Amino acid sequence: MTEKLKKANIEDSKLERIAKVMARAGLCSRREAEVWIEQGRVSVNGELLNTPAFKVSESDEIVVDGKALPQKEKTRLFLFHKPAGFVTTNKDEQNRPTIFDLFPDEFPRVVTVGRLDMNTEGLLLLTNDGELSRFLELPKNNITRAYRVRAHGKITQDKLDELKSRLKYQGTQYGSIKANLEKQQGTNVWLSVSLEEGKNREVRNVMEALGLSVNRLIRTSYGPFHLGKLEKKAILEVRSHQLKTSIPAFFK
């Protein structure tokens, strides 16, 4: 870091980490911002950054990939009914279809709140505010994700109740999970499952630990936001007032 940047960092009392500022502008997540900085894609006041451990003020000029960082817009949140067969990423290295291929050209720049794997369908949240995405993802905020699960095999409610205790499977520790048996349908069972951590492939892995093979997985809600009757591939923006009353802790 040059002396010029060091001085700017020390003198201004209203400083925020640059990754946080980039995320709040909706450009990317904090983690992505840190990677971009390390890749030499970000400059402040005309000088290239080489570390994400840097703070900026409102008066600093931040440039990413040669373009000025967009000004923070009003926080927006969208509900999207993701169909199976699409990956949750902007660009896929294997050239598989992504959810962004389904969005209209005029759709604003957004980041996803967590991810759904390719074969999982249901509610996916999208926002233009990377800080909101981070807030909704953090396990410490205890935000419940609910799913309907169809799986091959048989299970009893007593066995499902064991998931309320912490389960360790294939080296991964999972938190408490609530699961209810809805019905047995031929060789399949339908379950309703709710959890707060949302680890990678958590529902599928936990069901596998119980001897079940998931063949359909639908996320029905994420915190106070519900899939409801939203049709597949449809997008619905949450009204500003509803957004603020639904997650007041973020806006306080």
Image (cartoon, rainbow, N blue to C red):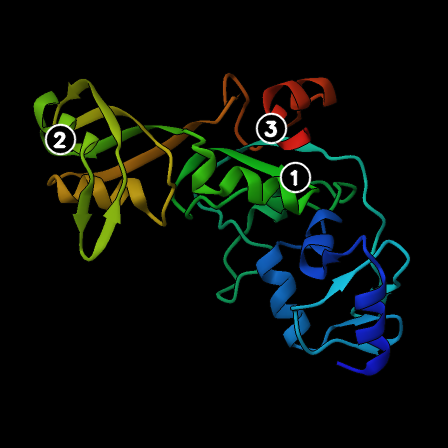
Of 56 and 237, nearer the camera is: 56
Badge 3: few (under 14), some or many (20 or more) residues near its Cα, within 10 Å?
few
Residue identified by numbered label 3:
249
Say which amino acid is labelled 2: Glu
For image coordinates 67% across by 23% down, the residue present is 244
Of 45 and 115, nearer the camera is: 45
Quadrant of image for the N terminus = bottom right
Badge 2: few (under 14), some or many (20 or more) residues near its Cα, within 10 Å?
some
- Mark 2 or mark 3, whichever is nearer to me: 3
Residue identified by numbered label 2:
162
Decide: marks 3, 1 in contact (CB < 8 A)? no
State which tag comes first along the sequence, 3 or 1. Answer: 1
The answer to whether 232 is drawn above or below residue 215 in the figure is above
Q: Residue 107 at what x, y percent from top left?
A: 74, 40
State which tag comes first along the sequence, 2 or 1. Answer: 1
Q: Residue 29 at what x, y percent from top left?
A: 62, 54
Say which amino acid is labelled 1: Thr
For image coordinates 91% across by 57% down, the residue present is 59
For image coordinates 39% across by 40% down, the residue present is 120
Residue 121 position by quadrant: top left
Decide: marks 2, 1 in contact (CB < 8 A)? no
Residue identified by numbered label 1:
127
Of 9 and 23, nearer the camera is: 9
The answer to whether 98 is drawn above or below residue 233 in the figure is below
- Mark 2 or mark 1, whichever is nearer to me: 2
Extreme bottom residue here? 2
Quadrant of image for the C terminus = top right
Spatial CA distance of label 2 from label 1 is 35 Å
Badge 1: few (under 14), some or many (20 or more) residues near its Cα, within 10 Å?
many
Q: Residue 199 at what x, y percent from top left?
A: 36, 47
